[in-house]
Image: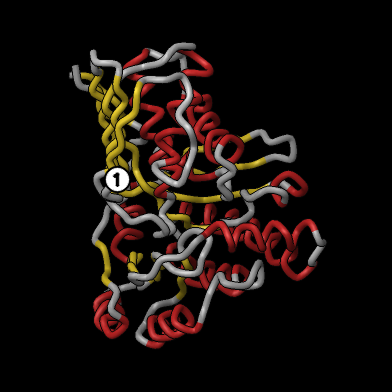
Amino acid sequence: MIVRSKAPLRIGLAGGGSDVAPYSDLYGGAILNATINMYAYATIVPRPDGKIILNSIDNGGKYEFSSVEHLEIDDNLILLKGIYNRVVQEYTHKPLSFELTTYVDAPSGSGLGTSSTLAVTILGAFAEWLNLPLGEYDLARMAYEVERIDLKMAGGKQDQYAATFGGVNFMEFSKDEKVVVNPLRVRSKYLNELAHNLILYNTKTSRLSSKIIEKQSENVLKKNMISIEATHKIKEQAIMMKEAILRGELDKIGKILNFGWENKKLMAPGISNSLLDEIYRTAMDHGAMGGKISGAGGGGFMIFYCPNNVRYNVIKALTKFGGISNRYEFTNVGLTSWSI
């Protein structure tokens, strides 16, 4: 028996950061994101020998353990261990024996939601194998709890839901920690045009997002009004972006992205830096109408809205920074799992 699963990474289009506690707990948050055809993958092969083998292909780590109810959390493959521990704790109440292999199409620290998407993918594989009674909201919530509560990994709430549901979604995060995912019925021609005009640029730099997120959370707790007001604006941006995309008013997207860029940088230090600022200026000088850093900021991927055919000028201009522009398409399918 072989059990497999995959879930898509996402591009955050607007509202990023308003889903991070304590801001979302105090004021509520709103996010607009869209999944793309880059994925996290997981394969589980049951074993009869009382061993657990964890194998992360992209990170180059492979570890073998005796089958136990709880794997010790250290610095190695903590997501894989954390998901396993929660599955045993909540469902099987006994050790399992298997080999788990994972791979992600984008590197850690890219800003495309890699760790949360991987958490969803692993949990989806266990749910397929063990026939766990997990609906979409249940699965996304459990993946969130493993990351943020069990493993104390800093971050927001959007990525687990994006990976689980897939598609273009407007997400609302209420003060009582309730999450509502609103799938948007965007006309295919608007999505195709958006994918054509929106460059996904890999800066080939990475960052430790937890440090930026921790500072952002600290600013809210300390009532730093510059940071809080900027996050209010980011939340407004999500509503603006939703209306523009649904109405097909794509000519407004660049301006909306630029509005978000200016406010995002006020949320916490480290979101941008001299290199990212120069990349942004260069893209704008060559025809981009707006852009943003993906994820928490500090590095990873950036996106730029390039109307008409200026994308080619922008891509050429950005080559001097050593990054690459990734081809992609939007996908409407979220977490998928199957058994062979």
Q: Nearer the viewer, residue 20 or 89?
A: 89
Colouring rule applied to residues: secondary structure
Dot 1: within a 10 Å radius of its alpha carbon, few (fewer than 14), some, or many (20 or more) residues?
A: few
Left or right, residue 335 beside residue 62: right
Q: Nearer the viewer, residue 152 or 259?
A: 152
Q: Is residue 46 above or below residue 40?
A: above
Query: Residue shown at 33%/68% (left/top)?
Result: 201
Q: Dividing the picture into quarters, in which one does residue 164 lie?
A: top left
Residue 264 falls in image quadrant: bottom right
- Rendered residue at 20%/21% (across/down): 2
- Image position, residue 62 (x, y; %): 27, 40
Position of 98 with respect to 297 (left or right) is: left
User: Where residue 45 appears, x then y in whole percent?
Assistant: 23, 23
Q: The N terminus lies in which quarter of the figure?
A: top left
Q: Observer-nearest residue: 287 or 244?
A: 287
Q: What residue appears at the point 31 percent right and 25 percent down from the top-left corner? A: 52
Q: Position of residue 305 (x, y in %)?
A: 40, 70
Residue 337, percent across and down? 29, 26
Q: Quadrant of the C terminus?
A: top left
Total numbered badges shown on the rendered structure: 1
Residue highlighted by disc 1:
61
Left/right placement of residue 318 relative to residue 235 reads: left
Q: Amino acid at mark 1?
A: Gly
The residue shown at (71%, 52%) is 23
Query: Is 16 above or below relative to 137?
Result: below
Give SS at disc 1. strand
User: Which residue is outermost to the right?
Assistant: 223
Relative height, residue 219 to residue 245 (above, below):
below
